[in-house]
Image (cartoon, helix red, strand yellow):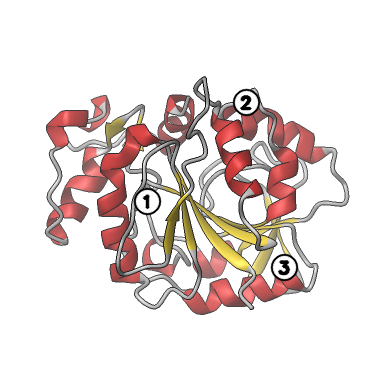
Amino acid sequence: MNDLTIVVNTCDAFADCWSPFFRLFTTYWPACPYPIVLNTETLDYARPEVELRAAKVAAGSPRRLTWSECLARCLDGIETPYVLYLQEDYFLEAPVRAEWIATFLDAMRAGRADVIRLMECGGSGPWHPTADESLWAVDRKAQYRIALQAALWRKAAMRGHLRAHESAWQLEVFGSGRARRKRGETVLCAARDRFHGGAREIFPYTPTGIVKGKWERAIVEPLFAAHAIEVDFSRRGFYGGSETGKRAPLTRRIADRARSLF
């Protein structure tokens, strides 16, 4: 019986990302064995190539739900004990190293971690090697002990960090503070000396394709062109610093992306 669900966290305002996301996902992980839940608010979406369900967590709600309320409702509707957390602008650039996802999932089943992060960004450490050469520990005092890049989560652990009023940015900031006090919780990441950078990443994407609600030109334009993905970039526009192809600093892009969500 499968015990992992892939959660692609999104909202209806980012529906134009779904087609390129899944086009690249099915290109670089064509034999994905796990079911996928696309965490939409009210919209439906389907792809014939993958086992996919749109969550529609806000359907019938008299008000717009917060970011955390949407994610909480999505998690509450998932039966598996583990989730692989992604977002709709984590556009794959190379093949997924699926064997390592399976290996890390086994580590979680054995109770060795509550979170295993697949993508680390600058400022997410410090980190410490462990007895397992494929996994490093995220320091308890790390600024972003809670991070929303691609990661395997024990579903109950992710659900326990959510507060109904918080945005994604607030979860990373204030949730990290809460996580530092959870002494029984183990946060690991893919060993940076083995898996960091480009195609060496287990889930290889460049954070992130959307910044402050606009396309990150230096990422999406060449990537989509290489895969013959047609998108009307003018509808969303390009993020300021990337108009000339120059990318904004990584930490600024991540912070801006988080603030743009609700």
Task: Name the element at disc 1.
Answer: loop
Q: Which mark is residue 122?
A: none
Q: Earlier in the sequence, mark 1 or mark 2?
A: 2
- Label 3 and label 1: CA atoms lie apart by 25 Å
Depth check: give the residue in front, 94 or 54. Answer: 54
Q: How many labels were placed on the picture? A: 3
In the displayed orientation, state which residue is furthest to the top. Answer: 63
- Label 1 and label 2: CA atoms lie apart by 25 Å
Q: Amino acid at mark 3?
A: Met
Quarter placement of the N terminus: bottom right
- The image quadrant of residue 193 is bottom right
The residue singled out by tag 2 in the image is 166
x%, y% of residue 112?
78, 67
Task: Name the element at disc 2.
Answer: loop
Q: Earlier in the sequence, mark 3 or mark 1?
A: 3
* Label 3 close to label 1 by CB (< 8 Å): no
Task: Note whether 83 is above or below 167 in the view shown.
Answer: below
Q: Residue at x 40, y 46 (%)?
A: 207
Q: Which mark is residue 108?
A: 3
The residue singled out by tag 1 in the image is 206
Q: Nearer the viewer, mark 1 or mark 2?
A: 2
- The image quadrant of residue 244 is top left
Task: Note whether 109 is above or below 77 in the view shown.
Answer: below
Q: Nearer the viewer, mark 3 or mark 1?
A: 3
x%, y% of residue 82?
66, 62
Q: Amino acid at mark 1?
A: Thr
Depth check: give the residue in front, 153 or 257. Answer: 153
